[in-house]
Image: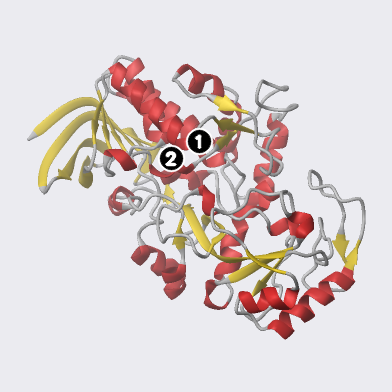
Amino acid sequence: MTAEYDVAVLGGGNAALCAALTAREAGRRVVVVECAPRHMRGGNSRHTRNLRCAHHGATAVLTDAYEDAEFLADLHRVNEGESNEGLSRLLIQQSHECAPWMERHGVRFQAALRGTLHLSRTNAFFLGGGKALMNAYYAMASRLGIDVLYDTEVVSLDLDGNSFGGATVETGGERRVIRARAAVVATGGFESNIDWLKEAWGEAAERFIVRGTPYNTGGPLRLLLDAGATPIGDPRACHAIAVDARAPRFDGGIVTRLDCIPLGIVVNQDGERFADEGQDLWPKRYASWGALVAGQPGQQAYCLVDAKAIGRFMPSVFPPFAASSIRELAQALRLPADRVVATVNAFNAAVREAPFDLEILDGCRTEGVTPPKSHWAQRLDTPPFWGYPLRPGITFTYLGVTVNETSRVVMNGVPSPNLFAAGEVMAGNVLRRGYLAGIGMTIGTVFGRIAGAEAADAAR
């Protein structure tokens, strides 16, 4: 069986639907190929809460301004200056239009919730979260007459040099060919492919938790790379955070994330601290903690807080271990109690108090202890004491395909005339090392819209 369209969109998350809606509104016949079943549609986007966007002043859901220059400086800071400058600027410029465009397509917004650290000014939150956002997009796609194929896996690409001709897909054990004048690949990274992760991380990857969809196995990405697409990004680079170690292996989502780290201390299985818990504002630092925990024995760590932190952060869906003393808490977590008590005592003695303010880099720091804590350092001295076990929680990988400013995939050194990429599969053009909260959705929305418009033009 062969079906013919103007634009084939491979993938079913935010970037894919932004591309599909844009191409359809340009008058093209569009099909969306989603490998997940209908109830799991949406990729990692269904687990999101917000997107980062530049804006010149306060809005109904955002406080104060977040100008382009500050956004770019933040991006350079977490990337250590390694991202594509032109694409980064394009992303930020276009981010101004993201929220209004999303609202026109059925997405609703709300103000930031209490406990979402440092995000009320920079990030617009979706009412109902990412699942509501994706449901709005799919409802709009249905109204516009976009065909959606669920449970459909891309197994091969028909490429003539750097030009797209079609894709062979499989559903229900049967194969069919989809022909299209242009295509947008928005199929995410390879974070759900444990064997591929082990190529980069070794056996440590066996103990990673995959926060998002189990369907991002990197099949189309591998097909593109094998066909000559120019790779971008380090295979080990990824958005990986500290999640509750009790989370499921796949698809636990954002509720497994632990935001208490800047309010306490983190120790490994030996009861030793190993990183600065207060190095920077949390949205600029939280995505570094996955790799930090991955580097510890057994890929395991533990966050300890006291009563002063309770109510200040969005808690895990799992209850904390609680105790009336640090020794009892260490025993509950099956940690070496003497070592944990010594670590906490040394930390408490090193705290140099200043006015505590979680909204800024407050200078509450330690002196004379290694590693230091640069901000929000408070003594752990007020019961009850809470503890959370941590594991690396990988969200998406940064290895992807190189694109230009029109989102065309660079194949064998030349931008394709009709093959485009958007979202996580090309995020490595912008993200190389760190992460800014909400920027993944910004990348998907901006480059999804660009890819959809350019694919519609190429399909004429």
Residue 297 lies in what quarter of the image?
A: bottom right
Q: Amino acid at mark 2?
A: Arg
* Whole-percent x, y for residue 178 in the image: 17, 34
Decide which of 309, 61 is in the foreground and name it: 309
Q: Is residue 296 left or right of residue 18?
A: right
Q: Is residue 340 left or right of residue 433?
A: right
Q: Residues within 10 Å of mark 2 (few under 14, many from 20)?
A: many
Q: Which residue is mark 2?
A: 46
Does any portion of residue 194 appear in the rendered image? yes
Q: Amino acid at mark 1?
A: Gly
* Whole-percent x, y for residue 314 in the image: 64, 48
Decide which of 278, 253 is in the foreground and name it: 253
The numbered disc on residue 129 is 1
Question: What residue is drawn where x is 68% and y is 78%?
Answer: 271
* Whole-percent x, y for residue 39 in the image: 31, 40
Decide which of 353, 222 is in the foreground and name it: 353
